[in-house]
Amino acid sequence: MEAAVGINAVNLQWGAVSRATNYSVSRNGTLRVAGVTDISHKDTPLPSEGLYNYTIIACNQFGCSDPSVAEIIDFFFDDDGDKVRNSRDNCPMVPSSEGEDDSDNDGSGDICDVDDDSDGLIDIYNVAALDAVRNNLAGTALDLTNADGDNETGGSSIGCGATTAGVCTGYELMTNLDLDDLDIIESGDFQGSNWQPIGFCGNADCDTNSQLFTTNFNGNGYNISNLHIRTTLARTGVGLFGAISSSAELNNTHVRNVNISTSSSSVGGLVGFGNGATISYSSVEGQLIRGGDNVGGLAGRMELARISYASTVVAEIRGGNRVGGLVGNGWNSMINSASAVVDKLNGDNLVGGLVGDISEEVSGILLAPVLRYSSAVVGEITSNNVDVGGLVGSSAQLSLSDSSAIVNVMGVQNNRIGGLAGFLGHPSTISSSLAVVNVIRGGDFIGGILGDTFGATATNSYWDNKTLLTITGLGRITTHGTEKSTFALRNATANSDGTFPGIYTTWDTNYCNPTTGEYREVTSGSAPAGFQQVWDLGTNEEYPAPNCLLNFTPAEQRIVRAAVLAGTSPFAAYNSLPSKQ
């Protein structure tokens, strides 16, 4: 007879006895089972670890033999069947060798530890794990199978957060991922796609029958490449993440080679719909993002959001109402240090190089969004109706400062078109900002800075009077902001003490820290360590350029700007930069 330890069992096997028809098995002198017709038996459960002896009796119709010689076995509990007792196995639920590597010394071996660095974020090493994020939207465990059918619970939390009270609160990328490693979806709404968005909206406002991503996602600077989405039915929320909640935070996440084509609303390369969420140090690059209303390169519809150090580089963005190079609808959001590089941007109404619409009046209350330290470089911005801006299509109230828009052509048959904003309500403000546009064409209310307004003001903000302002009907040209010649706008360099001369004397007090994301105003003395001025004046042959953008230096901006002003592709110019190779 042979005995072997199995998964919480002892597996017995013996040789057949001539003319025996059945067998009885005893453990430590106590009968365990009789009438066994096979020559094997699995003895389970066992009460404890220790030594056990087994004997076999062979029987037929005439009687039974004497017990066999006892087989003694040292039994131990082994939940995963890897021949390592649980008490010595640092991955007791996953087959592994004794002494499995334990990188974070938390007692859980790397092969089963979902959080190898004990930071409370589940480690994602492959596309299967990324795809499984949809199975646990709260980020408390890695659920590869969704066996419980619940998208908020289930999965393994082994090794979670040794430094966070044993709890995981999100996900993090540990390597670059290629979504082309996933199978193409062959049926259903996403047929022909390689990705179905994480989280979804059950209705247009995403407040009924919705499943939202609610936790943290840190891309750690890695890329997620080849995101291809097409849908056959209109829905709300399409992107890498379809819908995220106010508690969600996405940072250091970069999505490359994006192609999205859908009739859905709230469409973006990174996020479709977000309510009160935070996005930082993240970017999207791709060929096409096309949808219905609320379409943006980074995010489609972001309500009450906080977006900083974010960028998009997209060949074409197309949608209905509220279309932007970065965000389509940024309802009452705060956007800092953001940039968009786009060849063609088109929508029906409210189209902006950076944001289509950033606020609206709600129940008689005017909200106050902020757009600062940002840039849009766009080849062509067009709308089929009203409100087109180099940075913002429309906003009921906005504080816009220290930002620039460089555009080749804007407008066509539209009304309310401005180099920075198409329309701003009272009491919006524009300060320390720049618009350089080759051509603005429209039917009514067009201007180098602002198309139309109910009480907005523009101070220390300039537009290049080389702009060709063309009225296609009997409309009006507006005069907000200050008109300056190309020579005046480019004829300035910073003084040796860091102050700015001439028309830019008020532009030198705001500083940013790209590492920490902090901003400060410095009116005297030196700026703290790590801070730099938000504007770079360049040489006396260059326009000022923002300093505080994600992976887009002033020198690089000027190369891409030059392409736009020469009437060529900013998308191609950006992708030809040495740092992007």
Image (spheres, helix red, strand yellow):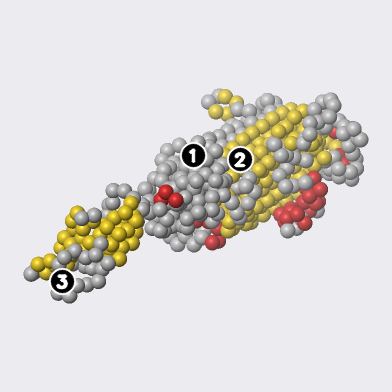
- Marks 1/2 in contact by CB < 8 Å: the verdict is no
Work out how far the residue at label 2 is from the one at label 3, CA to CA, in angstroms: 74 Å
The residue wearing badge 3 is 20
User: In the displayed image of the protein, which residue is found farthest to the bottom?
Assistant: 18
Q: Where is residue 356 in the image (x, y as percent from the top left)?
A: 63, 41
Instruction: Please tell me whether mark 2 or mark 3 is closer to you in this view.
Output: 3
Residue shown at 25% from the left, 71% from the top: 15
Q: What residue type is labelled 1?
A: Gly
For residue 525, say whether it is visible: yes
Q: State which tag comes first along the sequence, 2 or 3.
A: 3
Residue shown at 16% from the left, 60% from the top: 34
Instruction: Please tell me whether mark 3 or mark 1 is closer to you in this view.
Output: 3
Please tell me in which quadrant of the rendered image residue 256 appears.
bottom right
Work out how far the residue at label 1 is from the one at label 2, CA to CA, in angstroms: 26 Å
Work out how far the residue at label 3 is from the one at label 1, CA to CA, in angstroms: 56 Å
The residue wearing badge 1 is 166
Viewer-proximal residue among 547 and 286: 547
The correct choice, above or below, for 128 with respect to 534 in the image is below
Please tell me in which quadrant of the rendered image residue 3 appears.
bottom left
Q: State which tag comes first along the sequence, 3 or 1.
A: 3
- Marks 2/3 in contact by CB < 8 Å: the verdict is no
Residue shown at 41% from the left, 46% from the top: 154
Q: Where is residue 562 in the image (x, y as percent from the top left)?
A: 81, 51
The correct choice, above or below, for 199 with respect to 26 in the image is above
Q: Which amino acid does label 2 sit on?
A: Ile
Mark 1: few, some, or many residues within 10 Å (few <14, many ≥20)? some
The residue wearing badge 2 is 279
| Callout 2: SS | strand
